Image (cartoon, helix red, strand yellow):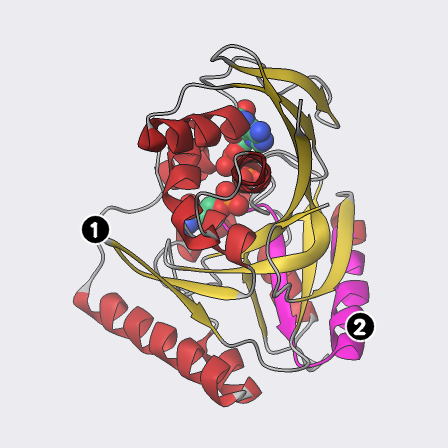
Amino acid sequence: MREVTAFAPATVANVSCGFDILGFAIDSLGDKVKVKLTEGSALKVVEIQGDEGKLPFESEKNTCSVAIQAMLDQMDLHVGMEISLYKGLPLGSGMGSSAASAAAALVAANEVLGKPFSKEDLVPFAMEAERIACGAAHADNVAPSILGGFVLIRGYDPLDVIKLPVPDGLHCTLLHPHLELKTSDSRSVLKQQISLKDATMQSGNIAGLIAGLYKSDFPLIGRSLKDVIAEPSRALLIPGFYELREAIKNVGALGSGISGSGPTIFILSSNESIATKAGEVSRKVFDEIGLGVDVYVSKVNVKGAFIL
Ligand SMILES: Nc1ncnc2c1ncn2[C@@H]1O[C@H](COP(=O)(O)OP(=O)(O)O)[C@@H](O)[C@H]1O
Ligand SMILES: N[C@@H](CCOP(=O)(O)O)C(=O)O
């Protein structure tokens, strides 16, 4: 029977000011999923590697099978598939781990079925997987993981997904402290109301960030990396967050923020050498507080999920 393996990249959701509406994809880090067409009509997760035994095999709980089931439901198609998941991303990391599994699974399953859907069409199916992973069908991880690049979710009802330009040279440093923070938990600490002043400030920064991407205006991108909605509540859950921001002030980075719902922190820089320096300085902050950290330096991935 036909089998296909796909890779889907890690993602940085929110990008500070764009809560639930902005995200971008990272190079090389990600999950792989193999999908094999079988007899019958059941989706079975048959193998999971790299998760330390933490992820569910039940097809109604794993984001791979939930996403594929949403796709089959839309087609009213009853086929059997065996799904093998190779986790490259840590769980509850803020790097879109649940999303990368769903994105890779969908791209592989779509290929196995002869590509009935475009990549854009796959986004709503992956959102259903996010609903079971964290209780909210947000698209700011799944859309960039599938499509690559910077992605804006202009609206959810109806879904309106827009790819944005990626300025040459833009690099991201990711600091993943050795902590697990579930997206569902870090959503539960958010305030449900915001003031007019904060709404105005956040709107200015989102508009500024998008204008900065279109103009390749690095200082404007840096000035816009501010979040008055989620960051004040969530930063308290991430040791070293403000110390890191202080420590990288003289390195020349554009700015820093929480990647998705954390605990990973992202830093944007205008070139690889600043991004690397920012990583070195940040590592020292975590060494000082005695918390292990993984540091990654990456370009923005403009390709998204792909068949291996
Ligand atoms: N294939 C999968 N990969 C990762 N997480 C999954 C998967 N399937 C289900 N989950 C559940 O989703 C949760 C992790 O998602 P989340 O907290 O959103 O992490 P992240 O911030 O890394 O995306 C875990 O509770 C995990 O059990
Ligand atoms: N917009 C979401 C993004 C969650 O990203 P994750 O990588 O932590 O799953 C949020 O801020 O809750």
Can you tell which mark lies on residue 277?
Answer: 2
**Quadrant of the image for the C terminus?**
top right
Rendered position, 33 above or below 231: above
Please tell me whether residue 278 belongs to the stretch shown in magenta.
yes
Residues in magenta? Answer: 259-286
Cα–Cα gap, marks 2 and 1:
42 Å
Query: Given the image, on which type of amino acid does mark 2 rest?
Result: Lys
**Quadrant of the image for the N terminus?**
top right
Query: Given the image, on which type of amino acid does mark 1 rest?
Result: Asp
Q: Which residue lies at the image location 39% right of the left edge and 54% below the top edge?
A: 230
Instruction: Please provide percent x and percent y for residue 268.
Output: 62, 71
Q: Which residue lies at the image location 42% right of the left edge and 54% below the top edge?
A: 120
- Residue 215, visible in the rendered structure: yes
Rendered position, 21 above or below 73: below
Instruction: Please provide percent x and percent y for residue 124.
Output: 36, 43
Q: Which residue lies at the image location 59% right of the left edge and 47% below the top edge?
A: 95
Q: Is residue 280 left or right of residue 249?
A: right
Q: Secondary structure at mark 2?
A: helix
- Callout 2 environment at 10 Å: few (<14), some (14 to 19), or many (20+)? some
